[in-house]
Image (cartoon, rainbow, N blue to C red):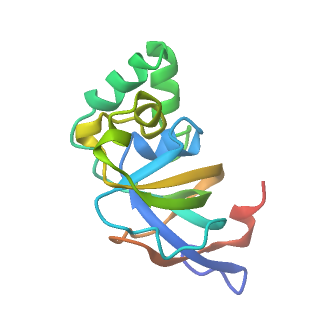
Amino acid sequence: SKGNTGGNGVEMPCFSMSQPFVSLLLNGIKTVETRNNPMFSDLEPGTRILLHCGFKDWRDQDAPRRELQKAGFTDEEIKKYSALPKGFSKGGIVGVLTVGKTWKSTAYERDDEDLQRKVVASADDMGVYCTEISNPQWFKRSVKARGSPGIYSATVPKSSLSS
């Protein structure tokens, strides 16, 4: 029953990201998301939010790889943690996670290697607004859906949310 959840749907906030960051978030490697706008600041810390995987990959695939190598991940681990699971495809909602507090970071904070490791980005590639991410959970299968900029409302089958 594509698209029609027949009353078994759950409406939740959702945001869209590109690969490899979708996988890095849902695999628990990336634990801070950064943006140049305070996109997440209206959400109560503890809010569960859906994660949509966009069709377009991040413009520089080498940048996250470099950051992960710096953090001590092997090439094999990087490949594993950066990939969508078997049977998953771009252009769908692939999981759910919890947003924590959002804060406006300083240039000094962005230079901190610990924060860079959590964001999986260099200071130059990082957004100013940082949001903690926890409790990532992959869906059993992706839910085909259109992405949107910012935070938007999306509906997924209830069954997607059960572990």
Number of marks in picture: 0
In the image, 42 versus 140, the foreground residue is 42
- Quarter of the picture holding the N terminus: bottom right
Residue 130 higher or lower than 9, as above or below: above
In the image, 99 versus 96, the foreground residue is 99
**Please, which residue is most extreme toward the bottom here?**
7
Q: What residue is at 52 percent from the left and 19 percent from the top?
A: 77
What is the quadrant of residue 86 in the picture? top right
Residue 33 picture location, percent across and down: 44, 51
Residue 104 higher or lower than 156, as above or below: above
Q: What residue is at 27 percent from the left and 33 percent from the top?
A: 61
Whether residue 66 appears in this view of the structure is yes
Whether residue 91 appears in this view of the structure is no
In the image, 105 versus 48, the foreground residue is 105
Residue 34 picture location, percent across and down: 38, 52
Residue 113 higher or lower than 35, as above or below: above
Residue 115 picture location, percent across and down: 44, 37
What is the quadrant of residue 37 in the picture? bottom left
Question: Left of 143 or right of it: where is 145?
Answer: left
Q: What residue is at 35 percent from the left and 72 percent from the top?
A: 148
Residue 69 picture location, percent across and down: 40, 17
